[in-house]
Image: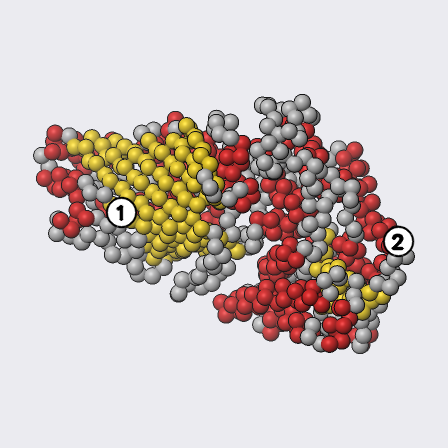
Amino acid sequence: MHYKNFIKELACACRIKHTVTRVVPSIHCNKSCTVQHERSRIVRLKKSLLGLASAFLTVSMISPAAFAASRHASASTQTLVALGDSIPFGYNLVPGNTAPAPQAYPYLIGKAEGMQVSDLAVPGSTSTDLLTLLTNASVQQAIKNASVVTIDTGNNDLLQLAEKDGLLTSATPKLTAAEGAQFEAAILQFGKNLPAILTTIHKLNPNARIVLYNLYNPFSPQLQTLYGLANTLLSQENAIILGDALQFNVPVANAFGAFAGNEATYIRPNDVHPTVLGQQVLASLGEQALAPASKDYQGKGAFIFELLAIMGIQPDRAGTSPFVDVPTHSFLWGYVNKAISMGLMAPDTATHFGVNDPVTEAQAAVIAAKLVNATLPKLQTPQVSAMEWALENHLFSALSPSRTMNLGDEIGFALHLKLLGIQPAATAIQIPASWQISQPAAQAFLQATLASEKPNYEQSTGTMAMKFNWDLTAAGQKDAQLKQVQSLFASPIKMGLKMNLQTVMGQIKALIEIDPISMPAFASAGGASTLTTPIHEFINGNKLYINSGKGYQPIPGSTNLQSVMNNFSLGGSSLAQLSLQSYTNVQAAQTASGYTYTMEIDQTKMTSFIDNMMSQFGGMGLPNTTNAAQMKTMMQAIFKTMQAKVQFSVVGQGPNARFSSVNEIMSIVIPANLIASQPGANASANAKVIKELKDISLNMNLSSDYAYKAIPVPTPAGLTQTL
């Protein structure tokens, strides 16, 4: 949030250059850089760790059968109803496909669990068809009598469109704008159908256990373009499945994760349907989803100890514990203190950590994602995003959001995470120790910061007022033209800034509008008091477009915007951490809705911030006559003169904390020698600047209000939809 405001100030400064270009060489704002997020894979683990992992994974694979065996006696009268399409039907496993195949996974689950099976799957059906099927009286009666209902739908919502558009037979399948709109509408309809399906089933039978399958990619990875396109579309439906599973508290059988990399074994050749082995895998996932949660759960104190220990993270035993349930002398204090400082967990209250609170699988996914600074898909909520990431990386074979984790679950989860080879980042965003504020206030600010780094939706409206002071030399006082410029800029310059941001499957989409500049002094000089044409910017994934009144024009070279945005991501943004470290004299006051923070910027700590920022943004987008080194030198000199005070308002508590407003008052001084040193002017012009101008000081006030409503970002007319 902090460096985002700095970028907004630069964006507004870009607007000013149209008015002062004859006096001061303009500085082009750059929003692009190349940031490579490389995650190393573990080549070799210690034999003891690998052995422990193998033993645990073996046990985890057979545990559903053990659970099933213990339930056979009581399950003899239970019934499983399977709903969906050709996958639970077992299509192409028996000749003719006249009836569901006995090798289909619903029958395999029924056999393992000792249940009768009613396979009501219909080949070729979509989620709309399934919703219609639920109005059938006999189907409703079957659901009323069911103990378990499995749902596997959504495949044909996409496949039928792909077949119709010829994507399945094209050598280089690519969506046109019209086809993309069709798929977008189909996914939107699926998002309406699935909760309606779950609601209907729940009303018919509130006691039935539901298992919701996500969707696997039915194509071979060797068909790279088709495989990648399918992954993009399926991920959107799987995100809907996961979000609804969380809302309705039903487990998700992770078919997508299980089939990824195993397509040649689990999918029939030249087909999209599972092999017999693939059906067995789907059955195993369903059994694991049905396995009861252990009552012998581990508290979150033990969970964080096991997770950090297995991941090789050292405890932080500094300070005195404020928690009555985790005293300072407890071995858990170091791990709890470390977890809180890394933003992995929040205490229940200022004096009670909640050491014995259970940890659910959904909570574990969020903690793991934060721990390794995962680049998460942009879904409905951070929790859903983390759960989708955990499923994609096989941390769970079946995920039940509210299911509590026992010791075996936690060790297995941590080992899976360790075996991914993703190292915990040493640069995770943390509140600096120099901030002398209460722990609840620090936690609220940290949570708001993390939320602002990866918002699914964000809207901001702001105003900026700037006032320039031209300090002239004696020679400059005699220059009538320069005196007129000094007079024109003596009055405040005001402008507005609006931004609407959305993230779709990890891609940034944003509209930025810089309102016309108000310059009253120009009116008194016989000119216009405002520049009437607003500036519009549109960010779409890796592309940046600017409209200055003549239509949107792409900015050449802006091909790494997504890398920039990814670097500003949850727990991984070095810019965010450096900006936190640059604040001093931090004070926090509790309000009825959250906290208000006031702080100043220590300009002596801005060097690292600018070095890091320039390494991220590089020289891309700078004028041909300017290089990154020159820009860096100028910025370092200017920021040494900066004086700034900032006020943040945070609303909400714990993981719901969000920034609601930011107000900044800042002043900087631009020495004449820096202006003269900029390329583009001849020697005589530079000499005149130094002779007549001492410096230009700028006082600036920026106020921004933030909202996080689910407002989609439209693509401007005339631009091709690329998301």
- Quarter of the image where one finds residue 128: bottom right
The numbered dot on residue 69 is: 2
Q: Residue 607: in sight, yes or no?
A: no
x%, y% of residue 668? 30, 33
Q: Residue 471: in sight, yes or no?
A: yes
Residue extending farthest front: 592
Quick check: 513 left or right of 116? left
Who's the residue at 76% across and 35% down the image? Answer: 49
x%, y% of residue 41? 66, 40
x%, y% of residue 218? 69, 62
Residue type, label 1: Lys
Who's the residue at 90% across and 57% down the image? Answer: 73
Quick check: 616 left or right of 256? left
Q: Distance between the residues labelled 2 and 1?
A: 73 Å
Observer-nearest of 655 and 717:
655
* Mark 2 vs 1, N-terminal side: 2
- Quarter of the image where one finds residue 591: top left
Residue bearing the label numbered 1: 494
Is residue 506 positioned above or below 443 on the image? Answer: below
Quick check: 693 left or right of 647? left
